[in-house]
Image: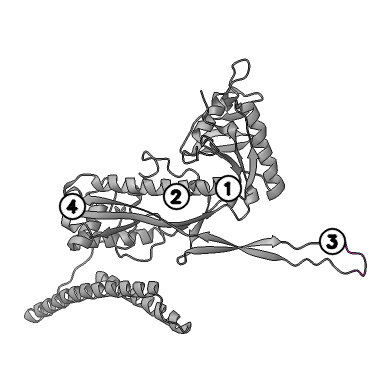
Amino acid sequence: MNTFLARLNEQRSQKADLIDATLNRAAEENRDITDVEAANVAALAKEIEKLDERIVQVSEIETRKAAAAELARKVDGSKVETREASPARVTREERTYRPDGANSFIRDAFAAQVLGDYDARERIARHQQEERIEKRDVTSANFAGLVVPQFLTDLAAPFARAGRPLADRARRHTLPAQGLTLSISKVTTGSATAVQSEGAAVQETNIDDTKLDITVNTIAGQQNVSRQALERGTGIDSLVMADLVSAYHTKLDDELVDALEGNSNITMVDYNDPTPTVGELYPKILDAVQRIQTAYFAGPNFILMHPRRLAFILAAVDNQNRPLAVPTSNGPTNAIATGSGLAQYGNSGYTIAGLPVITDANCTTTFGGVTTEDVITVGNLQELHLFEAAGTPFMLRFEDVKSAELEVKMVVYGYAAYTSDRYPGAFARINGSGTNTPSF
């Protein structure tokens, strides 16, 4: 069978199985299908209808080819054609979409769905297969869940936005395929032991737990692009996609930072002083460390702050005008902070009390009554949990709602959930008037 035809039949079978699974689940639970399930079934049925049309087209082509071959055999049945295949060796196979390639992913996605371009569909299907070979979590090659080529998404982090310094260091998990809420069991009352006297009853304390619910959030952005730009422009797809993906990453990190800094369950360390100094701030950081060790029974492994707060620390000098934070190459003596001074994306290159400092411009600078305070968070990244859907954050859809204006709507979206409430004692927050806008 033609491999393309086989792939179409496989896709049709997968979608039919999804419909059957939905209906069977409802039957087993003795209920009618929900509105969401009905919408999914309708969407899958529509996709099957389109696949059927394509299967018929390809099958007709195959039938005509077979008939032509049979006719040729009958006309000259005495001749038998034999061919010897030369040994072949594949040394390197180029990806369908690459930075220096002639094919444009966005242009092909648009042409395949909107214009019905067969060649574009073939390239998109080949790209999806390449992603499967790369072992990414892709389960469908339809246009509702395209995987954007990595060279486009790699442009996102440094593209004139804060990016995701904290999110890239959080404890990452794969978001379950279904559901809008994650539930985690938290033990609130633990077992107990005690010294037992001979013949006496053994200590018994019933374990108890509570449920921690985590909301699954949708983060999305859209852009209307003219057909002229997509069809005749140069580099427009890379520019638009990088900007959308960059905005997605930054918003996800911003939400994670807000959830951590705004968590009222973590330990609070107040630092109030109208004329703050780095010398006063340092004991507050150590106070946060010991509080985490006391509540979490493990040490912190990071300090999160806004770039302006690290700059405030680096700018501090002693009464001899010597910096209190110095590069390690200078052989520091009794320095408050040390570092290589080689700042990289999200990594300040400095440590305080032995803890690496993560700088993130998404950190809030509007805390406090006068809304000019930033926050310093000390904690353990193992308890900052980030769930991201498989294959995200790069989902691409074209919505043909701007056809009258010759525009195409491009949408990038993804699903994520995050929490620092599994063990809130693993974090401590330092803020107060001592973290007002610093002056230099």
**Pair 1/2: label in front:** 2
Inspect the magenta stretch and tell me whether residue 199 lies in it.
Answer: yes
Q: The magenta stretch spans which residues?
A: 195-200
Q: Secondary structure at mark 3?
A: loop
**Pair 3/2: label in front:** 2
* Cα distance between the residues tagged 1 and 2: 17 Å
Q: Amino acid at mark 4?
A: Arg
Q: Earlier in the sequence, mark 1 or mark 4?
A: 4
Q: Which residue is mark 4?
A: 227
Q: Which residue is mark 3?
A: 194
> For this view, does 427 lie left or right of residue 119?
right
Q: Amino acid at mark 3?
A: Ala
Q: Residue at x 33, y 52 (%)?
A: 149
Q: Which residue is mark 1?
A: 381
Q: Secondary structure at mark 1?
A: helix
* Cα distance between the residues tagged 1 and 4: 45 Å
Q: Amino acid at mark 2?
A: Leu
Q: How is the image coloured?
A: one colour
Q: Secondary structure at mark 4?
A: helix
Residue 115 percent across, percent down from the top left: 17, 61
Q: Which residue is mark 2?
A: 252
Query: In the depicted view, which residue is nearer to us: 329 or 19?
Result: 19
